[in-house]
Amino acid sequence: MAKMAASAAECGEDAFRKVFKFYKRRNPPPDFSDVVDFSTGAAGDKVVPAKLDPAAVSDAEAARVGLQPVRDWRAFGLQGYPGFIFISNPFLLGSQPFWVTQCLKTYPKKPNVCNLDMHMSPSDTQDIWGKSIHGLSCPPSGKREPKTLLERLRWVTLGYHYNWETKTYSANHYTPFPADLHRLSSQLTAACGFQGFNAEAGILNYYRSDSSLGIHVDESELDHSRPLLSFSFGQSAIFLLGGTCRQDPPTAMYMHSGDVMVMSGQSRLLYHAVPRIVPAPQGQTSLEVESCGLRDNTAMEQVPEQDWAVCSRYIQSSRVNVTVRQVLGLGQGFPATPSRRQETDAGWTNSYHQGPAEVEMKRKRSSSCDSVDTET
Ligand code: OGA
Ligand code: MN
């Protein structure tokens, strides 16, 4: 045991990293029997029911953003993780296509920022959706075809745009946060007992089947008393939730399409990661049902059939995760003098327009960087 700990320290290994590598492994594939599945109750010895506030959100308000009445939500906590709330797909049947379409067609549009902006001109990243639909609609020709822009999309930022280099948000890089996602976030957090949550920044991560997200803590927001929200769509993921230090072994859980996670209180600043994308369970999630055209049970805008054809094809092999953050506390502003890591406007612009190789390398090198890595 002591020997093992010493060698782990020597090569910079930690308990979290070990588990991360275990679930990331391809050959032989790992044993998934310890992965908590909130949808089935599997490996659920630490799972406890979570209390919600159904009176905080009316059924009509919930339906307006595509959510079931709060009394019907299945919400859970995890022993040892106070403030962590897992809501097993609270969406109304038929409303996920709306949110998936927002993530693929609407939110990547300007003025929002995405990874492709780092090495392409604004005119080239202007219409990611329009430039991708042909390639995504055609059945595979058998030949190796160039990837569409949508397939090369890795992240999009909303509101206060996260600066991956300095790991900060700043007042001078802000564009309006999408009103619909703001409303969805307000309803969800209100039901969890957080009144007045103000969605100010969003990070969308786009995962292919071989992508992963490194071990990190989300601490760049200035008010950690506000919860962090996470929505998953498409294929499933193994999510690891650890402790306040890397020595704490994490708990592994599945995130399926429609699942929502709230990290608040003592769980707001815990290490976490996504070591692996796994196929959505067959016949169990609403994903297939959503794809079958059973889409009338919703107060939401209907997604045009041809848009959904593209989106459903995309999510057959991909996962989209949306995290929503409140950056500033009530009445709080950004510090007047930029801290050492927070650059001036000019400096920010320069680092933002760095060459692609440099940005990509930095992202890949740092396991604590909030960006999706793809094995190639
Ligand atoms: C993040 C994050 C988790 C996920 O974007 O900070 O932790 O499930 N995402 O993709
Ligand atoms: Mn995170």
Image: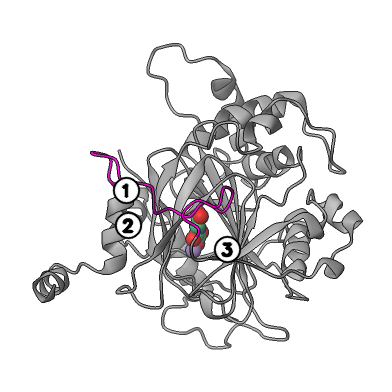
Reading the chain from its start, which is encountered first: label 3 or label 1?
A: 1
Q: Residue at x 28, y 54 (%)?
A: 21
- In the depicted view, which residue is nearer to us: 315 or 1? 1
Q: Which residues are magenta?
A: 24-44
Reading the chain from its start, which is encountered first: label 3 or label 2?
A: 2
* Pointer 2 with pointer 1, Cβ within 8 A: yes
Q: In the displayed structure, would residue 212 be above or below residue 164?
A: above
Q: Residue at x 44, y 63 (%)?
A: 164
Q: Residue at x 49, y 32 (%)?
A: 317
In magenta segment, residue 279: no
Q: Which residue is mark 2?
A: 20
The amino acid type found where label 2 is placed reads Phe
Q: Position of residue 65 (x, y in %)?
A: 80, 52
Q: Describe residue 128's horizontal placement relative to residue 211 as left or right.
A: right
- Tell me which corner region of the image, top left, top right, bottom left or bottom right, holds residue 101: top right
Q: Residue at x 84, y 37 (%)?
A: 297
Q: Describe residue 163's horizontal placement relative to residue 13 as left or right.
A: right
Q: Which residue is mark 3?
A: 161
Disc 2 secondary structure class: helix
The amino acid type found where label 3 is placed reads His
Image quarter where the N terminus lies is: bottom left
* Pointer 3 with pointer 1, Cβ within 8 A: no
The amino acid type found where label 1 is placed reads Lys
Q: Position of residue 306 (x, y in %)?
A: 72, 23
Real-space Cα separation, disc 2 to disc 1, in angstroms? 6 Å
Return the residue found at the far left. Answer: 3
Q: Which residue is mark 1?
A: 24
